[in-house]
Amino acid sequence: MIRHRHGDYRWQDIDVHPYKEDGTIFKSVTRQTLFHGADDLNVELRYFEVGVDGHTTLERHQHAHLVTIIRGSGQVLVGDKISEIGLHDVVQIPPFTWHQFRATNDEELGFLCIVNPVRDRPQRPGPAELDELNSNDSVAGFIRV
Ligand code: MN
């Protein structure tokens, strides 16, 4: 199977969806699912694009992510660490680790994300978790909730 490119950061027969439809807090993010798992490849491959100044949901979950940046740059929170990320960087999000991607550099941030097709629902921080996150000044300044 070859999923041919169809325009910039678009693929043949792949629809562009809102990032999430569960009412969680995010800004200017789209999702395209390029691969749903087949043969012995028990993975989904998605492309997410965060618009300028946008961000993904601050969340954690038992399943892990493997992310590769293919458009633009930005920053990511993984646990309590904030890092600059750019083209071709690879980011591993371990299980049950807070994470949020932001397009902070006046350009889009686009990344491929590999994930298990069978996975738990993301958790968002409650008041106690937010207090803990906000106790770290750099994290408090970064997160968008
Ligand atoms: Mn996640």
Image (cartoon, rainbow, N blue to C red):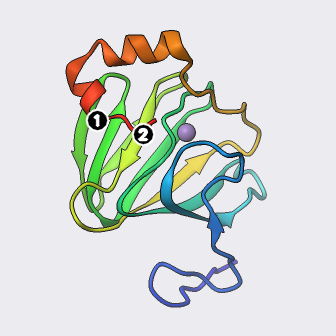
Q: Earlier in the sequence, mark 1 or mark 2?
A: 2
Residue 138's place in the image compared with 54, above or below, is above
Q: Which residue is at the front of the view, 67 or 110?
A: 110
Mark 2 Cα shell of 10 Å, populated few (<14), some (14-19), many (≥20): many
Element under disc 1: helix
How far apart in space, not on screen, are marks 1 and 2 (Cα)?
9 Å
Ligand 1 closer than 8 Å to the CB at disc 1?
A: no
User: Residue 123's x, y, as percent?
Assistant: 62, 27
User: Residue 120's x, y, as percent?
Assistant: 72, 31
Circles 1 and 2 in contact, beta carbons < 8 Å: yes
Residue 134's place in the image compared with 100, above or below, is above
- Residue 142: which disc? 1
User: Residue 46's x, y, as percent?
Assistant: 59, 59
- Residue 8: which disc? none
Element under disc 2: strand
Where in the image, quadrant-wise, is ligand 1 located?
top right
Drawn side of residue 77 relative to residue 60, left or right: left
Q: Which residue is at the front of the view, 138 or 1?
A: 138
Label 2: which residue? 100
Q: Which residue is at the front of the view, 22 or 98?
A: 22
Mark 1 Cα shell of 10 Å, populated few (<14), some (14-19), many (≥20): some
User: Residue 138's x, y, as percent?
Assistant: 21, 26
Total labels drawn: 2
Please name the amino acid that badge 2 sits on: Gln
Task: Please report the residue visible at 74 percent of the width from the left and 51 percent of the height from the top.
Answer: 40
> In the rendered image, which quarter is residue 19 located in?
bottom right
Marks 1 and 2: which is nearer the front?
Answer: 1
Please name the amino acid that badge 1 sits on: Phe
**Residue farthest bottom in this picture:** 7
Task: Please report the residue visible at 64 percent of the width from the left and 80 percent of the height from the top.
Answer: 2
Which quadrant holds the N terminus? Answer: bottom right
